[in-house]
Image (cartoon, helix red, strand yellow):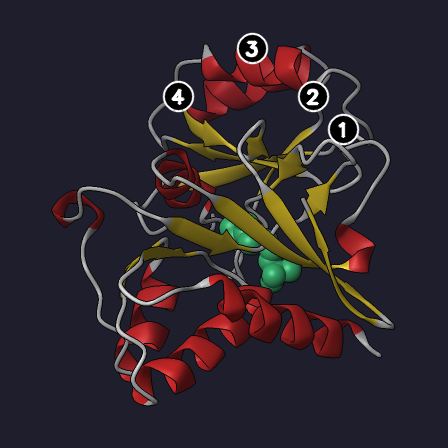
Amino acid sequence: MDQNELKKAVGIKSVDFIKPQMTVGLGTGSTVYYMVEELGRRVQAGLKIQCVTTSTRTWDQAEKLGIPLKKLNDVDHIDLTIDGADEIDKNFQGIKGGGGAHTYEKTVALNSQRNLWIVDQSKMVTTLGQFPLPLEVNPFGCQQLFQRLEKEGLKPAFRIDKQGNNLLTDMKNYIIDLHLGQIKHPHLLADWLDHQTGIIEHGLFLDLVNTVVVGCDDGPKIIE
Ligand code: 5RP
């Protein structure tokens, strides 16, 4: 199976975790796209749920499918959030933000009773860091922040769009990707990044995930 088929298979499988009356967080990305398509089919078949989203992309897709949507501030809890990821290690620590949506994704994840990630098998790694670690940063003072990151040896690069401009997030911030190769101590790095003024949020998602559905050639595997 190619990567897209694996993504589609886990996206569809993950919808089995959604039960009637749940409030569900919908992540962002190409794997989540398939999950939302399947959820739309089940809602049209009568499944009663409500959802919050982690990006305008997912909001627009879900809205078109008739999935009932709420703003995060208007729900009092989230039962389950289903999201993709860029890397996951064996302890379910991960990197997200390949789609630049990790600030909203982390906000929704932190407020969810249960977090489920859906990934194809290529995302499972021994050590995090081969995938560049995204930072959402405030444009004000981002050059100074960039220099600070360089001085720390964190190999930063601004994420650029097709027109050659700084890519803008849903919150109109920039993304800096850290090309680290490997992250030996994710908690130490997360703690340092949490304390740098100008970084809105980083893409290290630590101690957040309960279940992973991995797309393998012989079918989706549930790991808990
Ligand atoms: C977006 C994300 C995505 O969940 C992550 O990049 C995985 O995307 P995909 O399913 O397209 O591979 O974190 O900010």
Residue that carries the numbered disc 1 in the rendered image? 180
For the residue pair 79 and 143, the one nearer the viewer reads as 79
Classed neighbour count for the residue bearing mark 2: other residues with Cα under 10 Å, few (<14), some (14–19), many (≥20): some
User: Which numbered mark, 4 or 3, is in the foreground of this view?
Assistant: 3
**x and y percent of residue 104 in the render?**
37, 44
In this view, the residue farthest toward the left is: 74
Q: Secondary structure at mark 3?
A: helix
For the residue pair 156 and 191, the one nearer the viewer reads as 191
Q: Secondary structure at mark 4?
A: loop
**Mark positioned earlier in the residue sequence (3 or 2):** 2
**x and y percent of residue 76 in the render?**
18, 42
Tell me the residue at 52%/69% (across/down): 16
Residue that carries the numbered disc 4 in the rendered image? 198
**Mark positioned earlier in the residue sequence (4 or 3):** 3
Q: Are marks 4 and 3 in contact (CB under 8 Å)?
A: no
**Mark positioned earlier in the residue sequence (1 or 4):** 1
Tell me the residue at 54%/50% (across/down): 116
Tell me the residue at 76%/24% (across/down): 183
Quadrant of ligand 1 in image: bottom right
Residue 168 seen in the figure: no
**x and y percent of residue 139 in the render?**
37, 33
User: Which numbered mark, 3 or 2, is in the foreground of this view?
Assistant: 3
Residue that carries the numbered disc 3 in the rendered image? 192
> For the residues marked 1 and 3, what is the alpha-carbon distance in whole angstroms?
15 Å
> For the residues marked 4 and 3, what is the alpha-carbon distance in whole angstroms?
13 Å
At label 4, which amino acid type do we have? Gly
Q: Secondary structure at mark 1?
A: loop
Residue that carries the numbered disc 2 in the rendered image? 154
> For the residues marked 3 and 2, what is the alpha-carbon distance in whole angstroms?
12 Å
Q: Are marks 1 and 4 in contact (CB under 8 Å)?
A: no
Q: Would the CB of label 1 be found within 8 Å of ligand 1?
A: no
Classed neighbour count for the residue bearing mark 3: other residues with Cα under 10 Å, few (<14), some (14–19), many (≥20): few
